[in-house]
Amino acid sequence: MAPRNLGKSSTAKIIPFPQRPRAAEQNRILRISPEYEGLCLLYAHHALSRDKLYAVKILAWAQLASGKYVALLPWLTGIARCIDLDNANTGQSQGYYDPARERRFSEIPEHHLAALSAMRNYPAPSEGSFIQEFPDLIGSHAALLGDSMEFELQPVISWRLDSNGDMLAMVADMSQATHFPILVGDPCLFVVQRNPTFRYFFQYHIANQIKAGGEIATRALTQLLQ
């Protein structure tokens, strides 16, 4: 038997394995269809209860780079896709709920699917600009922490989908405001996530409890901000 040739073959060709797309790229938001009808995301949170499901209002529906369609909602320090909520101890997605019709469902509504599909042919924005901007309709608030360790709640006026797929919350700088009410696109709006004092997002019912001085809500917020 002839010995094996261990030398490098002149005809050898190394073909690299194709790299898997990074999860961050696959989960990049391409387009947004705002939720106008008060539909909710249902989620389990075992740290609060193992017997209940909780409902939170959906901000919008989105098409991801992976082709998936998901619900979006403000969650702690950013925007969560429903597929991000996958841990029952901290929040696990359990489908959707229509409170007006008392109906549970598991797929994106057809009219939102049609809207997102139609947007595929929209022209791409110029570099450095944002793709979409729409008003906040669920009462989102941003909690900011001042130098004296006191917090303030600011209502989110609108949301922008940046060209890189990030969702940016727009809050008003009241010292720059000249028109009231403040509307989408007003020059006094700024991106709250880029403010070093920003800490968390809260939805309408929690923000109202905090503003009313609710003991439990205020204590929870104080612990988070610390």
Image (tube, grey):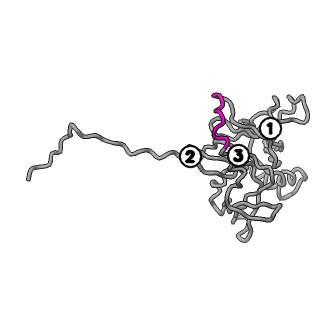
Along the viewing direction, whichever of 91 and 164 lies nearer the viewer: 164
Seen at 80% across and 49% down, the residue is 36
Residue 38 position (above or below residue 199): below
Residue type at mark 1 is Val
Residue 68 position (above or below residue 197): below
Image coordinates of residue 3 in percent, x first then y, are 11, 49
Distance CA(mark 1)–CA(mark 3): 27 Å
Seen at 15% across and 45% down, the residue is 5
Image coordinates of residue 18 in percent, x first then y, are 42, 44
Per the image, the residue denoted by label 2 is 26
Image coordinates of residue 109 in percent, x first then y, are 71, 55
Give the foreground label among 1 and 2.
Answer: 2
Per the image, the residue denoted by label 1 is 171
Q: Earlier in the sequence, mark 3 or mark 2?
A: 2
Residue type at mark 3 is Ala
Secondary structure under the numbered disc 2 in the rendered image: helix
Distance CA(mark 3)–CA(mark 2): 21 Å
Q: Earlier in the sequence, mark 1 or mark 2?
A: 2
Seen at 89% across and 28% down, the residue is 178
Q: Badge 1: few (under 14), some or many (20 or more) residues near its Cα, within 10 Å? A: many
Q: Residue 145, labelled with which disc?
A: none
Image coordinates of residue 136 in percent, x first then y, are 80, 44
Q: Are marks 1 and 3 in contact (CB under 8 Å)?
A: no
The magenta segment? 118-127
Per the image, the residue denoted by label 3 is 115
